[in-house]
Amino acid sequence: MVHFDNVHLSYSYFNEETKWKIFKIDHLLVKNNFIFVIETKNWNIPSYFDINKNIWYQYHGDKKIKLQSPIEQNKSHIYNLKKMLEKDKINLDNIFIINIIVIVQNNLTILKNENNKLSDNNVVINLTELENEIFKYSKKSSFFEDNKNINIIVMSILNKNKIENIEKHKKQLNYK
């Protein structure tokens, strides 16, 4: 399994929706047919995720504050990662990309009922659940199948990750 921390990827693909050329993925785990794109949140106060309404929020005193959805944030990372790999002509057939949101402080409450759950490739968990969540995928037969394409994906990510200092790169792109 290959693990990348704080992956800063840059490429010439320009996302018209977000207007960004650079995106930051907190963690990538790559194993055979799986790419785990992990977004971590280190929120100090209790947070709530209402699956029924797809809303994230916290209480600051008596005030309910809506938060940006980490799921949507990570979906954007996955979209851009796919575009980058496609640009490198990498075949993503039979590659499962899993969107994992990890709440580091273990202070997330998920509000849901039996009928509402996330799709299989979207996971929201507290940090204490991460190891078990990854282990669940290891039980799937494709987790152990050798996929030569994964080596190409890893090399592409490594090549894109050569930017050691993102601030320096932003200056090169004329970001202020």
Image (cartoon, rainbow, N blue to C red):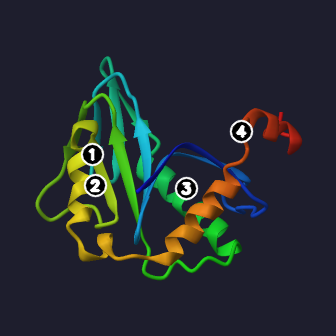
For residue 77, which numbered disc appears in the image?
3
Q: Are marks 2 and 1 in contact (CB under 8 Å)?
A: yes
Residue 40 lies left or right of residue 164; in this view the side is left
For label 3, the SS is helix
What residue appears at the point 30 percent right and 49 percent down from the top-left corner?
124
Residue 123 lies left or right of residue 139; in this view the side is right
Q: Amino acid at mark 2?
A: Ile
Residue 142 is situated, as x and y percent measured from the top left of the image, at 31, 76
Residue marked by disc 4: 164
Of the numbered discs 2 and 4, the one sitting upstream in the chain is 2
Name the quarter where the C terminus is drawn: top right
Q: Amino acid at mark 4?
A: Glu
Q: Distance from label 2 to label 4 (Cα)?
A: 28 Å
Q: Distance from label 1 to label 3 (Cα)?
A: 19 Å
Of the numbered discs 1 and 4, the one sitting upstream in the chain is 1
Of the numbered discs 1 and 3, the one sitting upstream in the chain is 3
Residue marked by disc 1: 130
What residue appears at the point 37 percent right and 47 percent down from the top-left corner?
101
Seen as rendered, the residue at the extreme left is 114
Residue 56 is situated, as x and y percent measured from the top left of the image, at 35, 42
Of the numbered discs 4 and 3, the one sitting upstream in the chain is 3
Residue marked by disc 2: 134
